[in-house]
C-alpha cells in the first residue's frame, strides 16, 4: 500500500480502513450494473478528514475490470 498524506492538513498520521462500497457502473456496451467492492478509505488522525486515496482508485479499477471479465465470461457461456 502507498503511504498517503492528508490532503486537508498535510499530516502523515493516516489510517486506512476497508469499507464495503457499491457503485453504479456501465459495461463497454453501456449497460449499467452494480459494482460491489471493498474500498480502502483513508482517514487523518490529526484533523479527522476522510478521503479516497490512490489505493481506492486502483481498487475501483480492479473491481471494474474483474466485473467486466466475469460478465464477458457469462455471456460467452450462454
Ligand atoms: Zn489531516
Image (spheres, rainbow, N blue to C red):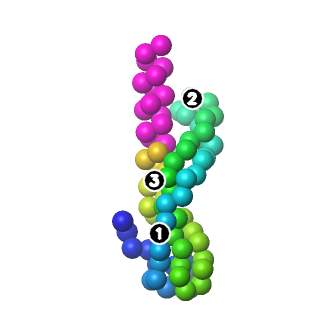
Q: Nearer the viewer, mark 2 or mark 1?
A: 1
Q: In x, y percent, where is residue 30?
A: 61, 32
Q: Residue furthest left?
A: 1
Per the image, the residue denoted by label 1 is 16
Return the x and y of residue 54 as percentages of the image width and height. Answer: 46, 63
In this picture, residue 32 sits left or right of residue 72 = right
Mark toward the start of the polypeptide (3 vs 2): 2
35 or 30: which is nearer to us? 35
Task: Name the quarter showing ligand 1.
Answer: bottom right
Is 25 one of the magenta-colored residues? Answer: no
Q: Check disc 2: other Cα within 10 Å, few if <14, some if 14-19, many if 20+.
A: few
Residue lying furthest top: 78
The kind of secondary structure element at disc 1 is: strand
The N terminus, quarter of image: bottom left
Q: State yes or no: residue 75 in magenta.
A: yes
The residues colored magenta run 64-78
Cα distance between the residues tagged 3 and 2: 22 Å
Give the alpha-carbon distance from disc 3 to disc 1, as whole Å.
13 Å
Which mark sits nearer the N-terminus, 3 or 1? 1
The image position of residue 25, as x and y in percent, is 59, 41
Answer few, some or many: residues within 10 Å of disc 3's Cα (few below 14, many 20 plus, some between 14 and 19).
some
* Ligand 1 has an atom within 8 Å of the beta carbon of the residue at disc 3: no
Query: Which circle marks residue 59 in the picture?
Result: 3
Where residue 29 is drawn, which disc sits there?
2
For residue 41, say whether it is visible.
yes
Residue at figure coordinates x 55%, y 34% from the top left:
27
Whole-number angstrom distance, CA of label 2 to CA of label 1: 34 Å
Q: Which residue sits at x=61%, y=30%? A: 31
Element type at mark 3? helix
Amino acid at each position: 500500500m502507498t503511504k498517503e498524506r492528508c490532503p486537508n492538513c498535510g499530516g502523515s498520521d493516516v489510517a486506512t480502513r476497508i469499507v464495503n462500497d457499491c457503485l453504479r457502473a456501465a459495461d463497454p456496451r453501456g449497460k449499467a450494473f452494480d459494482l460491489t467492492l471493498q474500498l480502502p478509505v483513508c482517514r487523518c488522525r490529526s484533523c479527522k478528514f476522510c478521503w479516497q486515496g490512490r489505493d481506492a482508485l486502483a481498487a475501483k479499477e480492479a473491481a471494474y475490470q474483474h466485473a467486466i471479465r466475469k460478465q464477458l465470461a457469462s455471456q460467452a457461456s450462454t
